Amino acid sequence: MMSASVREEQHRGWSQPSTPRFLHADLDAFYASVEQRDHPELRGKPIAVGGGVILAASYEARAFGVKTAMTGRQARALCPQLITVDPRMEAYTEASRRVFDAFADCSPNVEGLSIDEAFIDISGLGRIAGPDATIAGNLRRRVLEDVGLPLSVGGGSTKFLAKVASAVAKPNGVLIVPDGGELDFLAPLPVGRLWGVGPVTEEALRSAGVNTVGEVAELAPELLVAKLGPAAGRHIHRLANNLDPRPIEVGRRRRSIGSQRSFPVGTIDRSGAQEILLEVTDRVTRRLRTGERIGRTVTIRLRYADYRAGTRSRTLIEATNATAAVLETATELLDEAWADVSERGLTRLGIAVSGLTDDTALQLTLPFTKHDRHRLDEAVDQIRDRFGLDAVTRAPLVGRPTIEMPLLPD
DNA sequence: TCTGGGGTCCTAGGACCC
DNA sequence: TCTGGGGTCCTAGGACCC
């Protein structure tokens, strides 16, 4: 049985003026498909992109059990005739750009999820473009003809449903879940299909005797909250009932930029670690500058010999994308962590910069006490007198106050 | 399954503020 | 000077996704 609150929310959903309609478009075995497109001799054969680790496997390779994230050795053990190809990121970026052009021509409301998948809001397009299945079919045809790549498309009344449908439709298929058929479609699927249920959560549910999406849907939300925590528990209960009010978010910005490198355990001393830190910091700050972004929180990411993860982070007073500033903070963090690292052994080191803002504003966070407050007010007034009322914005006086001042053109 | 590299979001305790 | 409620930010860890 559905809980009363669920029924009520669903009723509210139905009373909306028009039902939202979403597509989820997902390129099949993306990198591998680009290679097969550009190298006809690879078509119909088991191929994988990547050497040490498999980044993508063609469906012919998947038939042997080859999967993303496997080592090359594991993959060749499963499929001795596997052909591996070095990745060509520029080719994939270019193909992605053209596929997203096709998405944009389908609807103005496109939310990219990664290099090879996106949500497309097609609500209200029916009158112009026809039924959902027609829109999806046209999109698939266009991507195949223009870019030469197979695209799978799922459709339904929520983003979540569209995403599940495209996964079920793969490879090279289309599946539109009809209005009213949502819960029947979802119920028999394994819980792992729920967005946000990975191995850990799946095992927790399985041990409680819950194996299908339908069983999650009928569980009391309180039970799921007790088992998985408030956010995850409520989230998966709502998804299982196809309650997903999230709209398409056009133009989402990245919230962090990072880079990392792995190496065999025991091969890196402190100076070797410093070289890697410089390399990854340089890569990250370069990307920040290219994107005209600055970040305020520097995190070093560690992976120990036992493959457990660790982080150390520090938030700067002023956001930056300067290599020297980020490296200085990262070096301090690594120094502080080094005793721990020496003891546990290291196999990966990386850095991430988060708290990103556009590089068009000067943002300062000033720690101060209430006794300084009138001086801050005076400073803000002076800047506004000189540069205009919009020159300074001040965050609410809670937590750590910030003032933000746009850089002036001259 | 002995495991790469790029990300997102959530949790929880402590510090700090009103 | 003490106490409580409500709230944000920082930090570290973890699950999950492609």
Image (spheres, coloured by chain):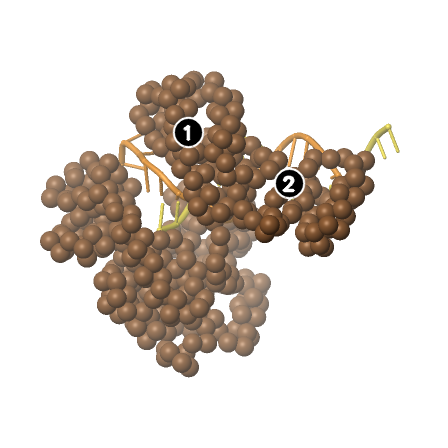
Chain colours: A brown, B orange, C yellow
Name the subunit of mark 1: A
Q: Give amino acid for label 2.
A: Leu
Residue that extends furthest to the bottom in the rendered view of this protein: A127
Residue drawn at x 19%, y 44% as measured from the top left: A85
Mark 1 neighbour density, 10 Å: few (under 14) some (14–19) many (20 or more): many
- Dividing the picture into quarters, in which one does residue A43 lie? bottom left
Q: Give amino acid for label 1.
A: Leu
Q: Left or right of A125: which side holds C6?
A: right
Res. A400 in view: yes
| Labelled disc at residue A138 | none
Residue drawn at x 44%, y 60% as measured from the top left: A111
User: Between residues A292 and B7, which one lies in front from this camera angle?
Assistant: A292
| Earlier residue among tags 1 and 2 | 1
Q: Circle 1 is placed at which residue position?
A: A278
Q: Left or right of A156: which side holds A376?
A: right
Residue A56 position (above or below residue A107): above
User: Between residues A123 and A17, which one lies in front from this camera angle?
Assistant: A123
Residue drawn at x 45%, y 66% as measured from the top left: A109
Q: Circle 2 is placed at which residue position?
A: A364
Residue that extends furthest to the front in the rendered view of this protein: A410
Q: Left or right of A163: which side holds A320?
A: right
| x, y percent for residue A209 | 41, 48
Res. A165 in view: no
- Dividing the picture into quarters, in which one does residue A203 lie? top left
Residue A255 position (above or below residue B16): below
Residue drawn at x 35%, y 64% as measured from the top left: A101
For numbered disc 2, what is the local secondary structure? Answer: strand
| x, y percent for residue A406 | 62, 49
| x, y percent for residue A143 | 28, 65
Query: How far is the residue under mark 1 from the one under mark 2?
Result: 26 Å
| x, y percent for residue A225 | 54, 48
